[in-house]
Image (cartoon, rainbow, N blue to C red):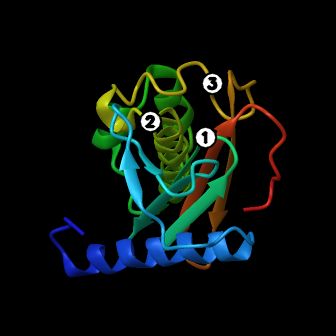
């Protein structure tokens, strides 16, 4: 609960409740989750050693996923397109792909979707954003083969947010 704003603290609590709900829904709940941290800083559930999880939140949205393999999830509200930000976090191919649309709403949605893909991969790896975001997914634009992982993404129009889930490269259900 180290977040500065009260709304972020509330969303973090909601994400934690989603984690408890997911454990109960899967029929594995036996105690409130206790967190440990790997050497790279990635959290794990010390009292559920066979369950991997990831949580994310942004304004008005929280997400949680549990799995039997490493996972990463990111959710972001689609904001107005920011070309300077896109140049800072996209490699050249990604930037050309995003900037290629004449419609700023589509650029904003495409950029946000790409950002959630990148952050879900960073969470899956356990590196967080300690690495250069331009290097995450390098050469792996959507619809290109994945290398070691699979990403499922969804744009939710009524809420105007994107969510992406990354996990080991085996079969993943497409519904989020």
For residue 154, the mark is: none
Whether residue 8 sits left or right of residue 29 in the image: it is: left
Q: What element does badge 2 sit on?
A: loop
Can you give x and y, in whole percent of width and height, for residue 69 in the image?
67, 41
Mark 2, other Cα within 10 Å: few <14 / some 14–19 / many ≥20: some
For residue 126, the mark is: 2
Can you give x and y, in whole percent of width and height, for residue 93 in the image?
52, 22
For residue 140, the mark is: 3
Whether residue 154 sits left or right of residue 98 in the image: it is: right
Residue shown at the point (63%, 57%) measured from the top left? 66
**In the image, is residue 115 above or below residue 91?**
below
Whether tag 1 and tag 2 are in contact, CB under 8 A, the answer is: yes
For residue 70, the mark is: 1
Q: CA distance from mark 3 to mark 2?
A: 19 Å
Q: CA distance from mark 3 to mark 1?
A: 20 Å
Which circle's residue, 3 or 1, is located before the other in the chain? 1
């Amino acid at each position: 609960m180290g977040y500065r704003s009260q709304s972020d603290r509330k969303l973090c609590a909601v994400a934690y409740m989603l984690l408890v709900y997911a454990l109960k829904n899967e029929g594995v709940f036996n105690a409130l989750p206790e967190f440990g941290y790997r050497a790279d800083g990635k959290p794990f559930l010390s009292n559920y050693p066979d369950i991997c999880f990831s949580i994310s939140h942004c304004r008005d949205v929280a997400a949680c996923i549990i799995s039997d393999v490493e996972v990463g999830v990111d959710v972001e509200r689609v904001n107005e397109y920011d070309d300077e930000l896109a140049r800072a976090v996209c490699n050249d191919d990604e930037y050309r792909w995003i900037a290629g649309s004449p419609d700023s709403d589509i650029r904003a949605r495409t950029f946000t979707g790409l950002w959630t893909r990148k952050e879900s991969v960073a969470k899956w790896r356990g590196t967080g954003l300690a690495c250069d975001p331009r290097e995450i997914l390098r050469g792996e634009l959507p619809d290109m083969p994945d290398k070691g992982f699979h990403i499922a993404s969804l744009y939710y129009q009524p809420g105007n947010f994107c969510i992406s889930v990354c996990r080991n490269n085996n079969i993943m259900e497409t519904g989020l």
